[in-house]
Image (spheres, rainbow, N blue to C red):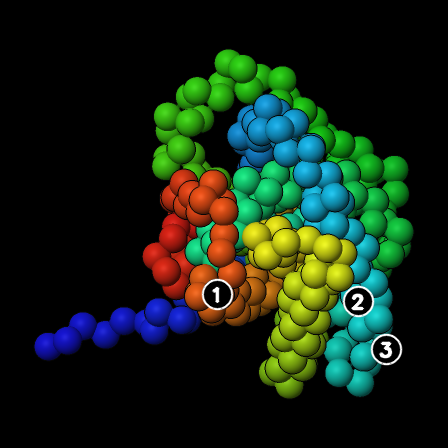
Amino acid sequence: MKRLSWPSWMPIDPYILALIGTVGLAALLPARGAAADVASGASTAAVAFLFFLYGARLSTREAMDGVRHWRLHVTVLVCTFVLFPLLGLAARGLVPVLLPQNLYEGLLFLTLVPSTIQSSIAFTSIARGNVPAAICAGSFSSLAGIVLTPLLAAALLGNSGGGFNADSVVKIVLQLLVPFVAGQLLRRWVGGFIARHKKILGYVDRGSILLVVYAAFSEGMVQGIWHQVSAVRLAGLLVVEAVLLAVMLLATWYGAKALGFGRADRVAIQFAGSKKSLASGLPMASVLFGAHASLAVLPLMLFHQMQLMVCAVIAKRRANDPETVPEPLLTPAAPVEGTRTAAGTATRSG
């Protein structure tokens, strides 16, 4: 009997299935009382550990090597932290006709998080684009997001989320910035260990995010916030996100062309500039939104799977473009343990 499999053009991210399972577990068995305190403490520790790993993984030398292509990186940063948020603000006009206020806040937060690294590299490689540029652009975006995402959230969301005040600033510094800087400072000593145990630490990385999701959705279940969202509203959210992704894909491709970038650079800009990182967004939301984090991350979770599916199709079509690509740009990116794209290139969620 022929074994059934998903179509090659429809990459179902196994990590999304794990996230859905975690949400289901939180719905059936939410952490309460002392268990909630333990889950919250473990989630806080997990966020700090995640950002320590982010800092320890980021190669300062690679980042400096990419500075010479500054126009491309600035373009990606503008798409990620200027154009995306402007579109998010424009979506305010859809409240309350198409989106309720709580889902809109999650949508706006989605537009503020940094770009992905691994999936942008993988899709750029499949599409025969500028892989080194995609590596640097994704790294710069993630680094900038540690500072810019909380600042933009404070400016654009105000007190609608978990409340942005002096305590929130202290939490951001202690849970995000301090671990990241510590990872960078200790990279000289721990970088080799992390490289040798990439697979194991990858499981720890993703497991930590699942813990963050469980704690956030458990708190949401206990407070009954899920009764505020209907299936019709969720369908409306999917439509809005589909339009958002389409606009960004078109803007990055044709905007890069208008700016005079070549095909290989346009590929890198399109895939790095149109994505949002689930791995960075989830722990940030737990710090910024507190008890409201579950609804805040729902739009990001849906957008993440949507961008994987759509970009996989685009990457395969870009690979058949008639333009000639210089040989150095055809070197495929090194596989990263985790999810897989349509062409079988491994990526990690986020």
Q: Assign a secondary structure to mark 2.
A: helix
Name the residue that disc number 1 marks. 322
**Residue 210: where, in percent of width, then height?**
50, 50
Q: Is residue 87 above or below residue 288?
A: below
Q: Is residue 194 above or below residue 349?
A: above
- Extreme residue in the left direction: 1
Q: CA distance from mark 2 to mark 1?
A: 33 Å
**Residue 98: where, in percent of width, then height?**
75, 83
Q: Assign a secondary structure to mark 3.
A: helix
The kind of residue tagged 1 is: Pro
Q: Quadrant of the N terminus?
A: bottom left
- Relative to residue 86, is residue 332 drawn left or right? left
Q: Residue at x 61, y 38 (%)?
A: 136
Front label number (3 vs 1): 1
Q: Is residue 174 above or below residue 126?
A: above
Name the residue that disc number 3 marks. 93
Q: Of label 2 and label 3, which has the lower sequence position?
A: 2
- 245 and 338: which one is in front? 245
